[in-house]
Amino acid sequence: MSKADISYYDWELAFKKREGEKKSSHSNNRYLTSTGIPESQFREHLEKWKKENLK
């Protein structure tokens, strides 16, 4: 194999690895809010905050 072939295969393997990491992290972040906590936990926090601060 030439250096160009080896370089291409190295790039291809690295690209596939990064794509796999992006997919797994993206699916995990689907249920998170912009603050990084789950949506259900965020709603609970808002309700608690409303009760304590908006009497």
Image: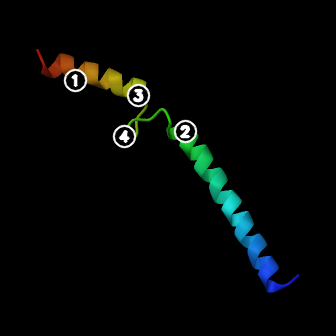
Q: Quadrant of residue 35?
A: top left
Please tell me whether residue 25 is drawn above or below residue 45 in the rendered image: below
Instruction: Give the residue pinned by disc 3.
Output: 39
Disc with the residue nearer the chain's start (2 vs 4): 2
Display coloring:
rainbow
Return the x and y of residue 53 as percentages of the image width and height. Answer: 14, 22
Q: Nearer the observer, disc 2 or disc 1?
A: 2
Please tell me whether residue 3 is drawn above or below residue 43 in the rendered image: below
As measured in the structure, the alpha-carbon distance from the residue carrying label 2 to the one carrying label 4 is 13 Å
Disc with the residue nearer the chain's start (2 vs 3): 2
- At label 2, counting other C-alpha atoms closer than 10 Å, the crowd grade (few under 14, some 14-19, many 20 or more) is few
Identity of the amino acid at label 3?
Glu
Instruction: Give the residue pinned by disc 4.
Output: 34
Disc with the residue nearer the chain's start (1 vs 3): 3
Identity of the amino acid at label 4?
Ser
Residue drawn at (68%, 58%), measured in percent from left and top? 17
Disc with the residue nearer the chain's start (3 vs 4): 4
Q: Are marks 1 and 3 in contact (CB under 8 Å)?
A: no
As measured in the structure, the alpha-carbon distance from the residue carrying label 2 to the one carrying label 1 is 26 Å
**Location of the C terminus (image quadrant):** top left
Instruction: Give the residue pinned by disc 2.
Output: 28
Identity of the amino acid at label 1?
Trp
As measured in the structure, the alpha-carbon distance from the residue carrying label 3 to the one carrying label 4 is 9 Å
Q: Are marks 2 and 4 in contact (CB under 8 Å)?
A: no
Image side of residue 48 versus residue 21, left or right: left
- At label 1, counting other C-alpha atoms closer than 10 Å, the crowd grade (few under 14, some 14-19, many 20 or more) is few
Return the x and y of residue 4 as percentages of the image width and height. Answer: 78, 82
Disc 3, SS: helix
Disc 2, SS: helix
As measured in the structure, the alpha-carbon distance from the residue carrying label 1 to the one carrying label 3 is 15 Å
Q: Which mark is residue 49?
A: 1
